[in-house]
Amino acid sequence: MKTWQDQSVLVAGLGSIGQRHTRLLHSAGVKTIYVCDAVEGLARKTAETYPGVIPVESYEAGLARRPDAVFILTPPRLHIPMAVQAAQQGCHIFCEKPVSDDMTGIDTLRGVLDETGVTFAVGLCFRYHEGVKKVREIVESGRIGRIVSIRAFMGENLPTVRPDYKTLFSAKYCGAFDLIHDLDLAVWFAGQPVRRMEVIYGNYSDIGIEAPDLAEFMIEFDDRCLATVHLDFFTNPRTREFMVTGTKGMAKVEFASWTKYTVSVWTEETGWESETRASARDDMFTDEDTAFLKAITGEPACIYGLDEGVRALALVDQALHGR
């Protein structure tokens, strides 16, 4: 069998996240990388940046090369139809979050995946973040007891991060809901069904986007656990914190900076203990890409499939469409 570096990969969508995955796959030594984008000339320009990368004129032309795997890194509304195309060609699929902009088509995609048997992974990159993984280990060790409360806060100033922000799909129809990673982490850590949810969202700042710039979730889970999740596109400076309170203590990770994170834990026996470590933004993306490629070659690897990818999406869909 081919090694994970011998897999041929088609990268579809060469915006900021597509450029990142292309660069990391190339740096990791993946030998055959095709790239495509709807913007004329962008695939050729990207290929010129990374020696050996092969531009193709369209997604269909890329699929015709029979790649082993496809990385779907386009706007969310395109994810499901592109994934269905790839699965029908027998390609394994890495799909950037969110799986779609709503739950329409999820059952169709699930049926195609079941029929073809291809691997489908969702880009839940913060599950690979070292700080989040350390908090996860603390929780799973039982050190802070049963989870009672989860608090996630994510806010960043979109005009500062992306001066071209008004042209982004995030500004037009996703808004703060595009920050779905933090909602995903809350649901993942709770690890149980949602009993009820309240959401307030809308345009509260002056950044002037069409889509909501703030969303506030309150989620009650089946067994005595409550989560609050704040998402916004105007906070300055960028702020990201994830905190879990248990019956015996609490643990949290603060990772507003891409260059470091701080994990803190408190128990009655030890009081506060904190550790700050250096990190790189690429690390979690590299880990998820490598895990996906290893998984499709049969190596042991941790990836997150469609069911994991739609848990947070289903809550966003319920908030926006009441279904």
Image (tube, rainbow, N blue to C red):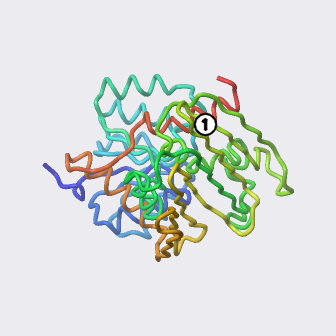
User: How many discs appear?
Assistant: 1
Residue at the front extreme of this rendering:
269
Residue found farthest to the right? 206
- On screen, residue 9 versus residue 238, left or right, reads left
> Image quadrant for the C terminus?
top right
Task: Tell me if mark 1 has few (under 14), some (14-19) or many (20+) residues whose alpha carbon lies within 10 angstroms of its own.
Answer: many
Looking at the picture, tell me which residue is in the foreground, 74 or 292. Answer: 292
Residue at 29 percent of width and 57 percent of height: 32
Is 100 rendered above or below residue 287?
A: above
The answer to which of 113 and 69 lies nearer the viewer is 113
> Residue 206, how many percent across, how many down?
86, 56
The quadrant where residue 183 appears: top right
Residue 123 visible to an observer of this rendering:
yes
Percent across and percent down for residue 78 are 54, 38
Residue drawn at x 52%, y 59% as measured from the top left: 251
Q: Amino acid at mark 1?
A: Asp
For disc 1, the marked residue is 101
Q: Position of residue 302 (x, y in %)?
A: 32, 49
